[in-house]
């Protein structure tokens, strides 16, 4: 039976979460007297609100990349505004150093950071940055030029900072909870790409024949993005911390010495006090440090790096600029983006079927290394193949990316204490973003021999 140490003091009626005595304001439930009753009650509370939590995690995952994917999906508008600046490649290259630098700092100080403030800051920055793109376009009347391009790059950098706050914070937080929640969040990340692709195809079709159609479609995109990011702020601030399953796992992490969940527990109506418990039971603060966690999970860290260094060396830069001219014309890149995003989303749901989930550490590494055959495959298909083969390859790129990401991030945290799971989640996201940064840098190699 798990129990809170004496460092927790309660001044309100108690509710038992699998033997964990918690203060839940406005609720009163006597503790079960028998172990069997405690187990039944704990199981019920652990699963209470599970499906609502899955939905909220999916929406929060959407919000983590919705703004950035919106910027990617209007690449035809930015190519029209800034034809000489390679906007798809440059914006991705600007985005990644800010994301990588920020996540490195946050991962290093993870144990002392207020997770609630971190995630709310990230979602709020996404909202404000999306709004800034609308203001910038309106202020310049939809004109191009180096000054406007620099402004768009600044917003891209802000998206990177926000991504590091939210993606690392949410993956770390969900790593100490049920695997279904982190899987739903990761599926939401992919769904943001699929949704933005679908919206872009709809807006392009709706405004294609109208005057200034590209700009109107882009503005609609950013307006939708602003609304969705504001929704995520409200969901995380008000709804998510009050879900019983979320309170259960955060309370469990607090009982294991986690200092990052206190504000979220307070938002859910649970008050904890740590000072006395540290003095009485110092072992509660004992945990593996980041270096130990990284060395023990170096294969998982390398997995995350290699998955994304390959993916981002092809998507989106190569697909938008180096696949040649085909019968789909200006729709070609959008169709490729849409196929990647849809199959990435499908791939993230396959591990829900246990018989298809790859759990072997050696098997994961072998599968990830085998993906590198896609580099010559894309090169020769772009040079000699038709658009059907390119769409097929792009679909497989997305499918394997989503599938392997979920397999790694749901397997790695198993067997660790809550604070260690949070730290490991942050470290794996750091490796993911490092892979993305390396990938978007290597993406420029496709331009060798083509001139500028």
Image: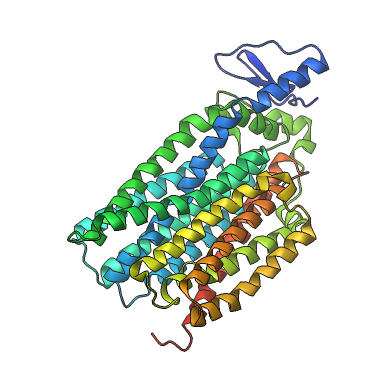
2 to 357, vertically: above or below? above
| Nearer-the-camera pick, 181 or 239 | 181
- Residue found at x 46% / y 52%: 194
Residue 201 seen by the camera: yes
15 to 227, vertically: above or below? above
> What is the x, y in percent for residue 341?
50, 57
Q: Quadrant of residue 92?
A: bottom left
422 sits left or right of 88 in the view: right
Label total for image: 0
> What is the x, y in percent for residue 246?
60, 31
Q: Quadrant of residue 401?
A: bottom right
101 to 254, vertically: above or below? below
Q: Quadrant of residue 47?
A: top right
> What is the x, y in percent for residue 342?
50, 54
- Residue found at x 61% / y 15%: 11
Quadrant location of the N terminus in the rendered image? top right
397 sits left or right of 178 in the view: left
| Nearer-the-camera pick, 80 or 389 | 389
- Residue found at x 56% / y 27%: 243
- Residue found at x 67% / y 37%: 178
Q: How is the image coloured?
A: rainbow
Quadrant location of the C terminus in the rendered image? bottom left
243 to 438, vertically: above or below? above
Residue 298 seen by the camera: no
50 sits left or right of 66 in the view: right
> What is the x, y in percent for residue 422?
66, 45
| Nearer-the-camera pick, 282 or 100 | 100
């Amino acid at each position: 039976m798990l129990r809170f140490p004496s460092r927790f003091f309660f001044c309100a009626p108690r509710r038992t979460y699998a033997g964990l005595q918690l203060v839940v304001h406005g609720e009163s439930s006597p503790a079960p007297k028998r172990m069997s009753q405690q187990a039944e009650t704990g199981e019920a509370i652990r699963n209470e609100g599970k499906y609502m939590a899955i939905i909220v995690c999916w929406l929060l995952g959407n919000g983590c990349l919705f703004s950035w994917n919106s910027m990617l999906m209007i690449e035809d508008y930015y190519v029209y505004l800034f034809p000489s600046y390679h906007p798809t490649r440059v914006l991705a290259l600007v985005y990644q150093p800010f994301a990588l630098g920020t996540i490195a700092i946050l991962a290093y100080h993870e144990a002392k950071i207020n997770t609630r403030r971190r995630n709310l800051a990230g979602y709020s920055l996404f909202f404000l940055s999306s709004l800034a793109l609308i203001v910038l376009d309106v202020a310049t009347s939809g004109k191009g030029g180096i000054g406007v391009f620099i402004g768009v790059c600044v917003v891209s950098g802000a998206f990177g900072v926000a991504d590091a706050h939210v993606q690392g914070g949410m993956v770390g937080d969900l790593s100490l909870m049920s695997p279904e929640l982190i899987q739903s969040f990761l599926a939401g990340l992919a769904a943001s790409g699929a949704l933005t692709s679908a919206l872009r195809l709809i807006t392009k079709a709706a405004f294609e024949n109208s005057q200034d159609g590209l700009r109107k479609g882009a503005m609609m995109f950013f307006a939708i993005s602003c609304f969705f990011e504001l929704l995520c702020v409200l969901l995380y601030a008000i709804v998510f911390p009050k879900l019983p399953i979320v309170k259960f796992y955060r309370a469990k992490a607090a009982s294991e010495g986690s200092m990052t969940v206190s504000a979220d527990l307070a938002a859910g109506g649970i008050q904890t006090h740590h000072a006395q418990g540290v003095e009485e039971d110092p072992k509660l603060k004992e945990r593996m440090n980041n270096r130990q966690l990284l060395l023990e999970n170096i294969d998982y860290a390398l997995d995350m790096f290699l998955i994304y260094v390959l993916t981002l060396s092809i998507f989106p830069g190569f697909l938008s600029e180096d696949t040649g001219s085909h019968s789909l014309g200006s729709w070609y890149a959008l169709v490729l983006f849409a196929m990647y995003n849809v199959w990435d989303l499908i791939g993230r749901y396959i591990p829900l079927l246990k018989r298809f989930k790859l759990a072997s550490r050696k098997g994961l590494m072998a599968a990830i290394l085998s993906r590198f055959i896609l580099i010559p495959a894309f090169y020769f298909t772009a040079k000699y193949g038709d658009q059907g083969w390119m769409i097929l390859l792009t679909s497989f790129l997305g499918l394997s990316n989503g599938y392997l990401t979920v397999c790694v991030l749901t397997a790695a945290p198993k067997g660790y204490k809550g604070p260690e799971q949070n730290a490991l989640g942050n470290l794996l996201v750091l490796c993911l973003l490092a892979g993305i940064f390396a990938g978007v840098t290597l993406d420029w190699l496709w331009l060798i021999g083509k001139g500028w």
